[in-house]
Amino acid sequence: MRGIRAFVGSAALWALLAARVAAAVEPVSMAIAIGAASILTGYLSYSGAFCRFSECCGEERTLNASALKLNLEAKLFGQHLATEVILKALTGFKNNKNPKKALTLSMHGWAGTGKNFVSQIVAENLHPKGLKSNFVHLFVSTLHFPHEQKTKLYQDQLQKWIRGNVSACGSSVFIFDEMDKLHPGIIDAIKPFLDYYEQVDGISYRKAVFIFLSNAGGDLITQTALDFWRAGRKREEIQLKDLESVLSVGVFNNKHSGLWHSGLIDKNLIDYFIPFLPLEYKHVKMCVRAEMRARGHAVNEDIVTRVADEMTFFPKDEKIYSDKGCKTVQSRLDFY
Ligand SMILES: Nc1ncnc2c1ncn2[C@@H]1O[C@H](COP(=O)(O)OP(=O)(O)OP(=O)(O)O)[C@@H](O)[C@H]1O
Ligand SMILES: *[C@@H]1O[C@H](CO)[C@@H](O)[C@H](O)[C@H]1NC(C)=O
Ligand SMILES: *[C@@H]1O[C@H](CO)[C@@H](O)[C@H](O)[C@H]1NC(C)=O
Ligand SMILES: [Mg+2]
């Protein structure tokens, strides 16, 4: 948008200059030129037209909270806590014209419970092109920061990237996947961007969104879910307060969480710890049905049951939770 404004500005200037030359001869053409210049400016900076050709950052774009809600409720299974917290966090953040800091969400949970899936939904609701957007950046620890001895280099790189990305678009979204495989300390490089500063070197990071994904704390979440189950209480009775503090403390003290002794937790820079509960047999079935529909097939309950029965469940005795959540459901379905 900044580019087109500059372009429109100079187009208008040229028109005026041309008019000034002409005005020496004829005052009427001066008026016409001014009119033309302002119409041009008005037309081209009408963002709706422009953003159809090239992706816009849309820093002032509002979040359609009801669309996000419908999306999460229809697509995300068995995660009442994550749904609730994500909705609350994003709605509050996007409704605030002047957020005091960037929004930071840390999502935790067992494998295949929907962390990447949700971050994709969130990304799509913030930038229509989702993960393909120029303003959504995915960092995968094992891919982008594999070597422990290069911590310093990675920290510099990360700061440079984020600085560049946020100066291009204030409402950029950064997703850090596999945080548990990130070497300790690397993530602290982004601490200044998450803090309550109005600006850092002339750039404001306050409209950016940072999302961390990890399996760290998954064991604590599972234990809580299991306690509820054994006490005969409903899964939906689990509340955020049963888990949030357990998670932040657990992750802080876990050497392999990517947030071990991290200043981000120490200084309360992570706004929400979001627990993803382990998925049950019935949720796996829901995933199979969703996948069938996505492939344009009619739902065949026979196959749904067969695919779900192929998955393995834990703990050994009760066999309540899927070992891999809904992961591998898609590839298993290929056999039918
Ligand atoms: N709660 C859920 N509701 C609906 N679909 C789900 C859910 N969890 C997982 N899925 C399906 O399973 C696939 C794999 O899940 P996803 O990649 O989000 O897992 P993850 O939590 O990131 O796991 P990991 O910790 O192993 O990376 C998703 O693409 C989605 O299709
Ligand atoms: C928000 O989303 C809902 C549901 O998808 C849709 O009906 C509504 O028109 C959207 N509102 C705006 C302002 O885009
Ligand atoms: C933005 O981030 C990406 C990584 O996702 C990086 O390749 C790119 O160079 C960054 N852009 C700027 C302007 O720094
Ligand atoms: Mg994942």
Image (spheres, grey):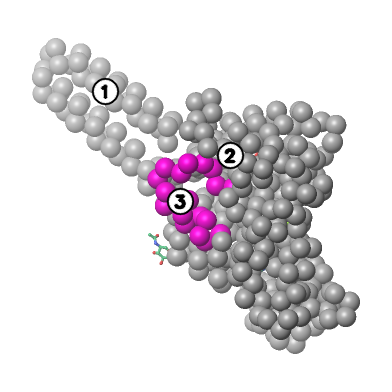
Say few, some or many: other residues with alpha carbon within 10 Å of mark 2 (under 14 / 14 to 19 / 20 or more). Answer: many
Residue topped by disc 3 = 94
Q: Quadrant of residue 49?
A: top left
Q: Which residues are magenta?
A: 86-104
Determine the secondary structure under disc 2: helix
Q: Amino acid at mark 1?
A: Ala
Determine the secondary structure under disc 1: helix
Q: Amino acid at mark 3?
A: Lys
The nearer-to-camera label among 1 and 2 is 2
Q: Is residue 40 left or right of residue 109?
A: left
The reply to whether dot 2 and dot 3 touch (C-beta < 8 Å) is no
Residue topped by disc 2 = 194
Which residue is drawn at the image coordinates 59% and 31% (left, top)? 163
Q: Earlier in the sequence, mark 2 or mark 3?
A: 3
What is the CA distance from the residue labelled 1 to the residue labelled 2?
45 Å
What is the CA distance from the residue labelled 2 to the residue labelled 3?
16 Å
Tell me if residue 31 comes above or below residue 61 in the rendering.
above
